[in-house]
Amino acid sequence: MVRFKSANTSLEDKPGRIRPSDFIDQALLTTVEEDESLTTRMLTENFEIDHSTSVRCLKKLRKVWTLSGGVSHELSPLIRLSH
């Protein structure tokens, strides 16, 4: 809102700035791949984000949760053929 109040109506980000969601997505992915035993609640505490944010980010990154931790949701070609 501050940008628009100052008559800056550009929708472009300033150079060198990273969108926070992109940073959080990458950080979550890296963390989960390093330690798949982390739960979404643990990630929420570590990153100081809302629980729904961590779940949404992991879903967007195609990670699903099992009892043992995060696993890739992508199906192998062989499994895809059998479905």
Image: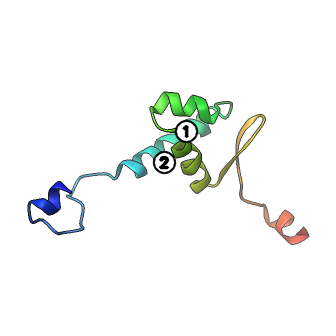
Does the rendering let one see residue 29?
A: no
Q: Secondary structure at mark 2?
A: helix
* Labels in figure, total: 2
- Residue that numbered label 1 is attached to: 51
The C terminus sits in image quarter: bottom right
**Residue at the location (91% across, 68% down)?**
82
The N terminus sits in image quarter: bottom left
Q: Is 64 above or below relative to 78?
A: above
- Residue that numbered label 2 is attached to: 25
Foreground mark, 2 or 1, reads 1
Its colouring scheme is rainbow
**Residue at the location (60% across, 31% down)?**
41
**Residue at the location (67% across, 35% down)?**
36
The three-letter code of the residue at mark 2 reads: Asp
Mark 2–mark 1 distance (CA, rounded to whole Å): 14 Å
Left/right placement of residue 15 relative to residue 63 reads: left
Residue 63 percent across, percent down from the top left: 65, 49
Indicate which disc, 2 or 1, sits on the residue closer to the N terminus.
Answer: 2
Q: Is 56 above or below relative to 28?
A: below
Residue 2 percent across, percent down from the top left: 16, 54
Left/right placement of residue 3 relative to residue 49 reads: left
The three-letter code of the residue at mark 1 reads: His
Mark 1 neighbour class, 10 Å CA radius: few under 14, some 14 to 19, many 20 or more: some
Does the rendering let one see residue 83?
A: yes
Left/right placement of residue 73 relative to residue 79 reads: left
Residue 57 percent across, percent down from the top left: 54, 49
Residue 40 percent across, percent down from the top left: 61, 36
**Residue at the location (56% across, 50% down)?**
56
